[in-house]
Structure formats: C-alpha cells, structure tokens
Image: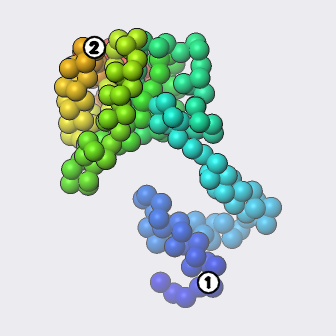
Amino acid sequence: MRRFPAPIHSVVSALSRLPGVGPKTALRYTFALLLLSPHELDSIGRAISNLRNIQVCNTCLAYAEKPRCELCSDSKRLDNVLCVIAESRDIATLEATNAYHGKYFVLGGRLNPIDGATPETLNVDPLITRLEAHPEIEEVILAFSPDVHGETTMIYLARKINSLGRKVTKLARGLPIGADIEYTDEVTLGDALIGRREV
C-alpha cells in the first residue's frame, strides 16, 4: 500500500478489523469519510463512541442500553415460549416478521469446534439455568440458520432441552439450506416461524 498520512493509515487499519472489510475496501471507506464535512465526521465519531454505552441484557444476553432490555421488560410478551438465536442481531430480523411475541435468548454463536465455538464458549449453561429457573417456559424455539453449524447446534440443544421435559421446535423449512437467517425476507421467515415443528 502506498504511503498516506498517519491519520489515514490509522483509519484504514481500524476499518480493516470489521468483518468483510479488507485493506482496499477500508481505504475506499476512508477516502469517502474524507469527503464529509467536519460536522458529519464528528457525528459519525460520536455515534461510534456511544457504542461504549451498550451492555448485555442480564436476562436474554442481547445487546441493550440498560441491564434489562426492552423485550425482556415488556409485560405483553409471552412468558411461556422462548426463542433461542445465535446472535443479538437476529432479534431484529425475527421481530420484523411480527409473527413472534415471546421472549428471546442469545446463544452467542453456533457450534463450530474448528473455530473454537464449543458448548463451553457459548451460552449453553446460562440457557439451561434459565429454563430450570422458569418452569413457565413450555416451548423453546431453536431459530438458527439451516446450515451445517446451525443444524448441529439445534441437535445438541434439543437433547439438552428435551431432558428438561420442554417442547423443542425449530423453524419450518421455509428457509433454504445454506441460507443465513440475517438476510432472509420477512415473509419467508414469518412462514418459517408459524410452521415450526417439534425437534
């Protein structure tokens, strides 16, 4: 890479840490930022800096502004069904369907031992603890992408949850194999939620 002033190198280096952003893309983003006004740059900087105020909900382990997120605090949400998802961002995707009105639990990823994602590194123990502490949860929906790692995770969790005597379901096959739940349209995802079946 040709030599640029140190602040440009610093921003390129910082942006390169983001997933899917290589050095060339980071350089394009940096030059796009250079075209913004000082006010716009300050606004972006403040928005990024405010991410430091984000914490993890002590109930569902999703990202939140308070110790307990809005969904966990919402008394209108159903208490007898729990949807287990891989990442906090999956909540927004499922909520967009308006087909689910229960509570959530963020597992923190999917089983993938090659990448170091084992039951010990995921939130499996906190999930089991939550289920044991809340007998009112009758059904657990496993909402993972239908790929190898998602299926493996669902099989593993289904065994653990079934041993607690809870009904375990997964999203219906409206989702194609290999699809990522984050990029699935609301209609397909809504049908998958409504047509879920027991594991």
Q: Which residue is mark 1?
A: 6
The percent coordinates of residue 38 (x first, y second) are 79, 66
CA distance separating discs 1 and 2: 57 Å
First of labels 1, 2 by sequence position: 1
Q: Which residue is mark 2?
A: 167
Q: Residue 104: name its quadrant.
A: top left
Residue 184 locus on image (x, y percent): 41, 33
Residue 188 shows in this picture: no
Point out residue 44 in the picture as x, y percentages from the top left corner: 69, 57
Callout 1, which amino acid?
Ala
Q: Is residue 132 above or below residue 150?
A: above
Which residue is pictured at 39% across the width and 21% down the height? 133
Badge 2: how crowded within 10 Å, few (<14), some, or many (20+)? some
Q: Which residue appears at 19% of the width and 25% of the height?
A: 159
- Colour basis: rainbow
Under circle 1, the secondary element is helix
Question: Relative to 44, is 78 above or below?
Answer: above
Q: Secondary structure at mark 2?
A: strand
Left or right: 134 in relation to 161: right
Left-right relation of 44 to 154 = right
Q: Looking at numbered disc 2 in the image, what kind of residue is underneath it?
A: Lys
Residue under the image location 42 percent in, 40 percent down:
87
* Residue 123, picture quadrant: top left
Q: Residue at x 25, y 18 (%)?
A: 164
Q: Is residue 74 above or below residue 126?
A: above
- Return the x and y of residue 95 as percentages of the image width and height: 51, 25
Q: Can you say which quadrant of the picture contains the C terminus? A: top left
Nearer to me, 187 or 73? 73
